[in-house]
């Protein structure tokens, strides 16, 4: 299937977080590709990936990075596609560095910044599907079904002490 979401990350070490984005895309039936693309270790690859993503049929890019996390902003500067940034938790500063690096884009180049870590990666997958759902009824329905199921799960299990 033609990938519609590009899920990239600065290092293989980001995968345990970024796999949650992929899990959500899989659940919602959205085709994706995954790549390690580093802003500082493979800058040429990063530019090539960002510049060619749209013409390859990618519709949304999810970019995860930790520390001085310039990957999402640099990629956003080279593509008209929406870029969703996931701050990966860093050892030294617990991901606050990643969050601020990704969120504090100067006006003019947009990166949609999600929460630090697993929740952010999960929601990046969800938001990518919601963006695609604006023009794809099947994906929109999958998002609506997911949300309805989530609601049902809470309402069907009101007692927190019961497994
Ligand atoms: C960033 O540096 C990556 O996104 C990763 O979060 C962080 C550490 O990378 P490794 O040293 O674990 O490869 O580029």
Image (tube, helix red, strand yellow):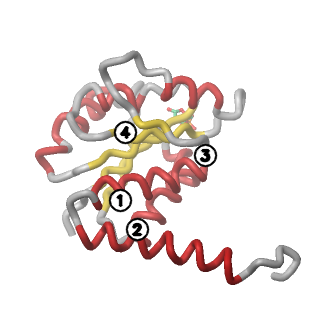
Ligand 1 positioned in quadrant: top right
Tell me: residue 75, above or below residue 21: above
Residue 140 placement (x, y as % from top left): 32, 67
**Disc number for residue 117:** 3
Q: Which residue is drawn at 43% across and 21% down?
A: 105
Q: Which of labels 4 and 3 is toward the front?
A: 3
Give the image quarter of residue 71. top left
Q: SS class of the residue under badge 1?
A: helix
Residue 82, quarter of the rendered image: top left
Q: In the image, which is nearer the foreground, mark 2 or mark 1?
A: 2
Q: Nearer the viewer, mark 2 or mark 4?
A: 2
**Which one is closest to the eye, mark 1 or mark 3?**
1
Q: Name the residue under label 1.
A: 129
Q: Disc 1 vs disc 3: Cβ atoms closer than 8 Å? A: no
Q: Mark 1 and mark 3: span between their CA atoms?
A: 19 Å
**Mark 4 sits near ligand 1, with its Cβ under 8 Å away:** no
Work out whether mark 4 precedes mark 1 in sequence or the reverse, and give the earlier one.
4
| Circle number at residue 161 | none
Q: CA gap, disc 4 to disc 3?
A: 18 Å
Instruction: Give the labeled residue for mark 4.
Output: 37
Q: Are the residues at dot 2 and dot 1 in contact (C-beta closer than 8 Å)? A: yes
User: CA–CA distance between discs 4 and 1?
Assistant: 22 Å
- Residue 143's label in the rendered image is 2
Determine crowd level at label 2: few under 14, some 14-19, many 20+ residues with C-alpha closer than 10 A: many
Horizontal relation, residue 63 to residue 151: left or right: left
Q: Distance between the residues labelled 3 and 2?
A: 21 Å
């Amino acid at each position: 299937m033609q990938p519609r979401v590009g899920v990239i990350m600065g290092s293989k070490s980001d995968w345990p977080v970024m796999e949650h984005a992929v899990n959500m895309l899989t659940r919602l039936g959205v085709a994706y590709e995954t790549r390690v693309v580093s802003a500082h270790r493979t800058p040429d690859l990063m530019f090539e990936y960002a510049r060619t993503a749209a013409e390859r049929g990618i519709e949304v890019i999810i970019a995860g990075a930790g520390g001085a996390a310039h990957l999402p902003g640099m990629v956003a500067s080279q593509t008209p596609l929406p870029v969703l940034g996931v701050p990966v938790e860093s050892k030294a500063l617990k991901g606050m560095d990643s969050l601020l690096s990704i969120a504090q884009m100067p006006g003019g180049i947009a990166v949609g910044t999600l929460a630090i870590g697993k929740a952010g990666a999960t929601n990046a997958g969800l938001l990518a599907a919601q963006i695609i759902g604006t023009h794809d009824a099947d994906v929109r329905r999958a998002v609506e079904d997911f949300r309805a199921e989530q609601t049902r799960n809470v309402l069907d299990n009101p007692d927190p002490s019961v497994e």
